[in-house]
């Protein structure tokens, strides 16, 4: 399993070394796992003499991918997304660019030999348990050159950031990177009653990985349109600085203000309820925070008495027509994020309610929308502006057809 993945990485690396283009374009996600992935790839590729152009994306939007694949002869690397859409990337690429996918979400095989899907999911590993994107990127970096072993602690931060623990601790490849960092004296693992705590050890003392993960999430998510991801990658490679601390504090204040305003709206009638779903629309009011923040806002309210614990929760947000690093892009799309209460979580886990990973992509497909990474308890997709109510209707239709609802 792991051997097959490493073999596939070796093959891809051989092609990378033979490829004439010596600038790597790295497209990575903006959460802690994605930022650590971007940092690991940047450092590892630069060490091999590549010039790295990094682009942080909140999602691999088709409109963005179309632009990316207008190029030819390039070296393109996708990290922490795109595993599932390898067939689509293959269709866009048509053998023209050497493309690598280092994701860990549920994946589909590529159909273009020049698109290497190195998603561990295709090799029998579980991306929501064994291996994060950061650990996948670390394995890639290590396969590239063993000098990159010193990046293990960055991979561990990403793994903790994605929050895939078994009995309170990292497992499999994710745990291996943490143990590697411990051996290098860069990490300490503390046992406690419910599992393990992972502490990064730096020149200025220790930071729990979980805290650093939140810190990176704020830079990448809240600060997405304000160079937060650049600062996040810098923090991964060079550590926390007073400058990054200041940025995080400012971003937190922005988030609190915007969230409080939205909560006020929901308290005064902005939450719409259907048979199984409760939903709201924030239009463009979360800007300049990134569109990941609609999911974060759902998370912030899903356990509160603002919402009905027996219904699915959905929030819509208009996607801004800009992506840092790209020319203007017209999306004309809304993002929907869905979450569930602790009660609904129990129902889904017990198989008595439909998981979001089935419900939302199915309804989105029917409206010609785009699904990327959907999990059973958290999910997000995009549809054209104006189709919001139709999407809710489609989900209701699906739920009414399910015998257990
Ligand atoms: Mn991830």
Image (cartoon, rainbow, N blue to C red):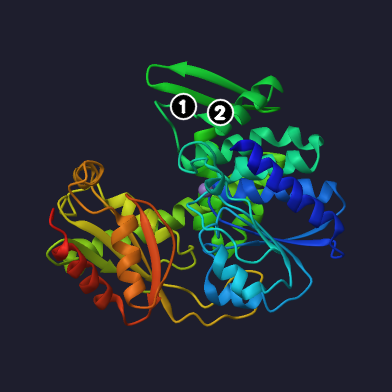
* Label whose residue precedes the other's in the sequence (1 or 2): 1
The answer to whether mark 2 is within 8 Å of ligand 1 is no
Q: Quadrant of residue 278?
A: bottom left
Would you say the residues marked 1 and 2 are in contact, meaning their CB atoms lie under 8 Å apart?
Answer: yes
Q: Where is residue 11 in the image (x, y as percent from the top left)?
A: 75, 50
Q: Name the residue under label 2.
A: 175
Q: Is residue 174 above or below residue 35?
A: above
Q: Residue at x 80, y 56 (%)?
A: 16
Which quarter of the figure is the N terminus placed in?
Answer: top right
Badge 2 element: helix
Circle 1: element type? loop
Query: Where is the C terminus found, in terms of image quarters?
Result: bottom left
As rendered, which of 140 and 210 lies closer to the eye? 140
Provide the residue designation for mark 1: 169
- In terms of depth relative to the viewer, which is nearer, 251 or 122? 122
Nearer to us in this view, 139 or 110: 110
| Left or right: where 353 falls relative to 49 | left
User: Which residue occupies the foreground of this view, 191 or 20?
Assistant: 20
In the picture, residue 100 is in which quadrant?
bottom right
Residue 353 in picture, x, y percent from top left:
19, 51
Residue at image coords 64%, 43%: 5
Question: Percent from the top left, x then y, of residue 374?
Answer: 40, 56
Q: In this view, does 274 lie above or below 312?
A: below
> Is residue 229 toward the left or the right of residue 348 in the image?
right
Question: In which quarter of the view is residue 361 placed?
Answer: bottom left
Could you tell me how far apart the alpha carbons at marks 1 and 2 are, in whole angstroms? 8 Å
| Residue at left offset 77%, top offset 46% | 44
């Amino acid at each position: 399993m792991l051997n097959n993945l490493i073999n596939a990485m070796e093959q891809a690396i051989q092609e990378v070394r033979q490829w004439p283009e010596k600038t790597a374009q790295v497209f990575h996600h903006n959460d802690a796992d994605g930022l650590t992935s971007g940092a690991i790839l940047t450092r590892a590729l630069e060490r091999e003499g590549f010039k790295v152009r990094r682009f942080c994306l909140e999602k691999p939007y088709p409109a963005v991918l179309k632009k990316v694949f207008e190029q030819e002869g390039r070296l393109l690397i996708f990290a922490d997304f795109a595993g599932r859409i390898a067939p689509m990337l293959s269709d866009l690429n048509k053998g023209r660019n050497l493309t690598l996918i280092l994701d860990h979400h549920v994946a589909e095989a590529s159909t273009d030999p020049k698109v290497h899907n190195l998603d561990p999911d295709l090799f029998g590993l579980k991306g929501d348990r064994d291996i994060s994107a950061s650990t996948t990127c670390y394995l890639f970096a290590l396969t590239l050159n063993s000098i990159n072993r010193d990046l293990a602690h960055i991979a561990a931060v990403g793994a903790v950031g994605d929050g895939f623990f078994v009995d309170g601790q990292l497992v499999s490849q994710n745990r291996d990177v943490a143990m590697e960092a411990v051996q290098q004296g860069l990490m300490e693992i503390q046992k406690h009653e419910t599992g393990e705590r992972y502490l990064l050890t730096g020149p200025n003392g220790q930071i729990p990985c979980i805290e650093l993960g939140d810190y990176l999430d704020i830079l990448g998510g809240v600060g997405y349109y304000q160079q937060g991801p650049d600062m996040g990658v810098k923090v991964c490679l060079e550590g926390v600085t007073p400058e990054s601390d200041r940025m995080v504090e400012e971003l937190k204040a922005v988030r609190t203000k915007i969230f409080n305003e939205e909560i006020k709206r929901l308290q005064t009638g902005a939450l719409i309820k259907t048979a199984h779903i409760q939903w709201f629309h924030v239009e463009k009011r979360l800007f300049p925070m990134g569109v990941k923040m609609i999911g974060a806002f759902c998370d912030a309210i899903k356990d509160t008495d603002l919402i009905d614990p027996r219904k699915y929760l959905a929030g819509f947000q208009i996607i801004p027509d800009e992506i840092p690093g790209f020319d203007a892009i017209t999306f004309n799309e809304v993002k929907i994020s869905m979450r569930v209460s602790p009660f609904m979580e129990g129902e889904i886990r017990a198989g008595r309610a439909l998981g979001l990973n089935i419900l939302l992509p199915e309804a989105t497909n029917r409206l010609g929308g785009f699904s990327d990474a959907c999990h059973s308890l958290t999910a997000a997709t995009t549809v054209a502006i104006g189709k919001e109510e139709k999407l809710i209707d489609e989900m209701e239709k699906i739920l009414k057809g399910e015998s257990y609802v």
